[in-house]
């Protein structure tokens, strides 16, 4: 272990225990991310399993809302487990979190579907998702703090970057297991019972992770602080009710983790959903392309973590936010161009107008049994399912909704909405060249992969250095609590809500790119606030640092 004296570190080789710390923390955190992202990856698939049929966008929003519940509760997990971690210790706290995550994930694999128990199914699903969120809320802060407090002064960025790879590795692992199951059985078998296998597999991963973590010892910095009687007796109030700690917690959120969160989820999850939902790529192609980008991009977490030890954490994080805000719109448009040029051509040569009273439209962010979907909502839903943009016009006559589609073959107008109107429009657009799926012969796989790789580089820029930055931002006696809350609000709320918000905005505005305004605005906000109010942290002695 390195001995820190002021800002000078006497560097010694990593001991066997220190290497075990990095491996055990990383393996356990990979498992937690694998569990958490299984549901997120299967959210569009779960829309048909756990929610009523009849409106695909509504069911998808419901599935995303259930997924978002896990993200929303993550800050509360940070408060609960962060407090315990600052009072009792890092090791035992994130040992508990991994057990809670494993049990709740295994429970998803045992669940009956909506067809069997009705609305009880999504209720149970959300409950298990909340437990997952609580567990993850306590896991990350503990793992990052634990590794950082074992690290030499001049390699905290590099060592904690291994923790940063775990989210992407867990995502990749979830994709690989799901794709393996889908390829190894019929479509019907996967829909009936095969989807449960990835959740059952978490039991084996849980056993391995717990076994490894039981071998760990408490953080030496925490042990020293505890032996000297310097632990915080009230880490929650010390973190968030006392100045200047509360100021730094707020700045960490708005000036670092909020932008990092939206860049992370845009570059990986929203890119996946965009390719499958709007570009109409089949699941196998989509999963494969995303998986390759994860393999290619993951080493750069370590690269940017290492680089942050040399030039600083903050400038790398903020540069990633700025670049992302500038390139998202052109790159997502390029995704459609390279993934489904026939759909893009139809979009450019056609015009779709939905005429309705704006007051008749519903912004269905959290869809459920309380939601009402009128003819306007159903018309918008149908057009959105085709991956098409449309414009809105004032109400036309006494009909609740009128849809006009002008293509190279002429103009088709339907009044009102029902199965007949839907069939008429679908035939008119198909006859005019609207593809029902991406033509594999015309997909430019190389350019899609280039774009996805750029997304991953931006993810690694903002995420690789963030753990070291947050650990260094707060004193030891409140570090676990203080860093966990802004991290999980930034990632769980700002980032985790992105697929839900973006999908709802697209449905409301009638433009498949409109949802990108959400990450662009948040990333820009983070760049401005972080650049103005936060300072570099890489040279701080985390064993003695106190807020100025």
Image (cartoon, rainbow, N blue to C red):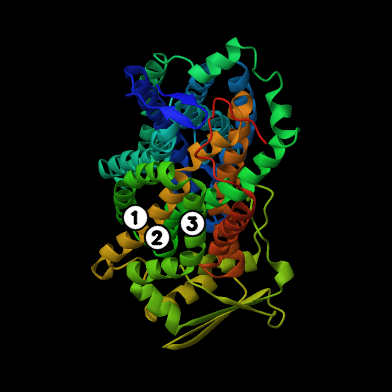
Q: Is residue 531 visible?
A: yes
Secondary element at image label 1: helix
Q: Is residue 288 above or below residue 381?
A: above
Looking at the image, tell me whether mark 1 or mark 3 is earlier in sequence order: 1
Question: Could you tell me residue 433's position as x and y percent?
Answer: 37, 78
Q: Residue at x 26, y 44 (%)?
A: 183
Query: Dot 1 corresponds to which residue?
Result: 286
Image quarter for residue 106?
top left
Question: Could you tell me residue 352's position as x and y percent?
Answer: 53, 79
As rendered, which of 203 and 473 lies closer to the eye?
Answer: 473
Looking at the image, tell me whether mark 1 or mark 2 is earlier in sequence order: 2
Q: Residue furthest top?
A: 227
Secondary element at image label 3: helix
As rendered, which of 490 and 386 lies closer to the eye?
Answer: 490
Is 399 displayed left or right of 217 in the figure? right
In which quadrant will I find the N terminus?
A: top left
Q: Residue at x 37, y 72 (%)?
A: 337
The Cα atoms of the two marked residues, 1 and 3, are separated by 28 Å
The Cα atoms of the two marked residues, 2 and 3, are separated by 26 Å
In which quadrant will I find the C terminus?
A: top right
Q: Residues within 10 Å of mark 3 (few under 14, many from 20)?
A: some
Q: Is residue 92 above or below residue 401?
A: above
Is 246 displayed left or right of 94 in the figure? right
Question: Could you tell me residue 149's position as x and y percent?
Answer: 48, 25
Image quarter for residue 438?
bottom left
Q: Is residue 8 above or below residue 340?
A: above
Tell me, yes or no, whether the two marked residues, 1 and 2, touch with CB atoms within 8 Å: yes
Q: Is residue 19 above or below residue 520?
A: above
Query: Dot 2 corresponds to which residue?
Result: 275
The Cα atoms of the two marked residues, 1 and 2, are separated by 6 Å
Query: Dot 3 corresponds to which residue?
Result: 319
């Amino acid at each position: 272990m390195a001995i820190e004296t002021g800002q000078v570190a006497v560097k010694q080789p990593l001991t066997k225990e220190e290497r075990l710390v990095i491996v055990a923390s990383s393996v356990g955190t990979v498992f937690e991310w694998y569990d958490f992202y299984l549901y997120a990856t299967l959210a569009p698939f779960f829309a048909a399993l756990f929610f009523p049929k009849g409106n695909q966008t509504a069911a998808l929003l419901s599935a995303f809302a259930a997924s978002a519940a896990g993200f929303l509760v993550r800050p509360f997990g940070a408060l609960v487990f962060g407090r315990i971690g600052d009072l009792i210790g890092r090791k035992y706290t994130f040992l508990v979190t991994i057990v809670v995550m494993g049990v709740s994930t295994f429970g998803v694999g045992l669940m009956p579907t909506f067809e069997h128990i009705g609305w009880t199914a999504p209720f149970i699903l959300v409950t298990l998702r909340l437990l997952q969120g609580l567990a993850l809320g306590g896991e990350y802060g503990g793992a990052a703090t634990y590794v950082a407090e074992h690290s030499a002064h001049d390699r905290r960025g590099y060592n904690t970057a291994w923790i940063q790879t775990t989210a992407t590795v867990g995502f990749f692992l979830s994709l690989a297991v799901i794709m393996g199951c889908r390829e190894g059985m019929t479509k019907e078998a996967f829909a009936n019972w095969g989807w449960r296998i990835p959740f059952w597999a978490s039991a084996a991963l849980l056993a391995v992770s717990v076994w490894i973590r039981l071998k760990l010892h408490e953080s030496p910095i925490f042990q020293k602080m505890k032996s000297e009687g310097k632990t915080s007796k009230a880490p929650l109030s010390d973190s968030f009710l006392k100045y200047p700690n509360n100021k730094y917690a707020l700045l960490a959120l708005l000036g670092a983790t909020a932008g990092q969160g939206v860049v992370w989820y845009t570059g990986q999850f929203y890119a996946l959903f965009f390719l499958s939902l709007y570009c109409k790529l089949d699941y196998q192609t989509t999963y494969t392309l995303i998986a390759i980008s994860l393999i290619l991009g993951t080493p750069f977490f370590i690269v940017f973590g290492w680089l942050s030890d040399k030039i600083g954490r903050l400038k790398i994080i903020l540069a990633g936010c700025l670049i992302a805000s500038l390139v998202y719109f052109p790159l997502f448009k390029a995704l459609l161009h390279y993934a489904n040029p026939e759909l893009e051509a139809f979009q450019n040569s056609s015009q779709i107008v939905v005429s309705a009273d704006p007051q008749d439209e519903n912004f269905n962010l959290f869809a459920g049994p309380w939601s009402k979907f009128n003819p306007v909502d159903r018309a918008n839903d149908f057009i959105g399912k085709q991956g098409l943009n449309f414009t809105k016009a004032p109400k036309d006559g006494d009909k609740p909704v009128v849809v006009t589609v002008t293509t190279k073959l002429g103009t088709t107008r339907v009044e009102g909405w029902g199965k007949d109107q839907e069939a008429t429009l679908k035939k008119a657009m198909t006859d005019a060249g609207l593809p029902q799926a991406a033509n594999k012969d015309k997909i430019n796989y190389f350019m899609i992969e280039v774009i996805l790789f750029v997304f991953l580089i931006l993810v690694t820029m903002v995420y690789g250095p963030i753990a070291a930055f947050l650990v260094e931002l707060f004193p030891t006696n409140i570090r676990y609590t203080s860093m966990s809350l802004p991290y999980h609000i930034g990632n769980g709320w700002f980032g985790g809500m992105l697929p839900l918000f973006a999908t709802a905005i697209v449905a409301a505005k009638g433009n498949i790119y409109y949802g990108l305004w959400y990450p662009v605005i948040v990333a820009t906000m983070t760049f401005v606030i972080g650049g103005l109010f936060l300072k570099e942290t890489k040279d701080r002695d985390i064993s003695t640092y106190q807020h100025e």
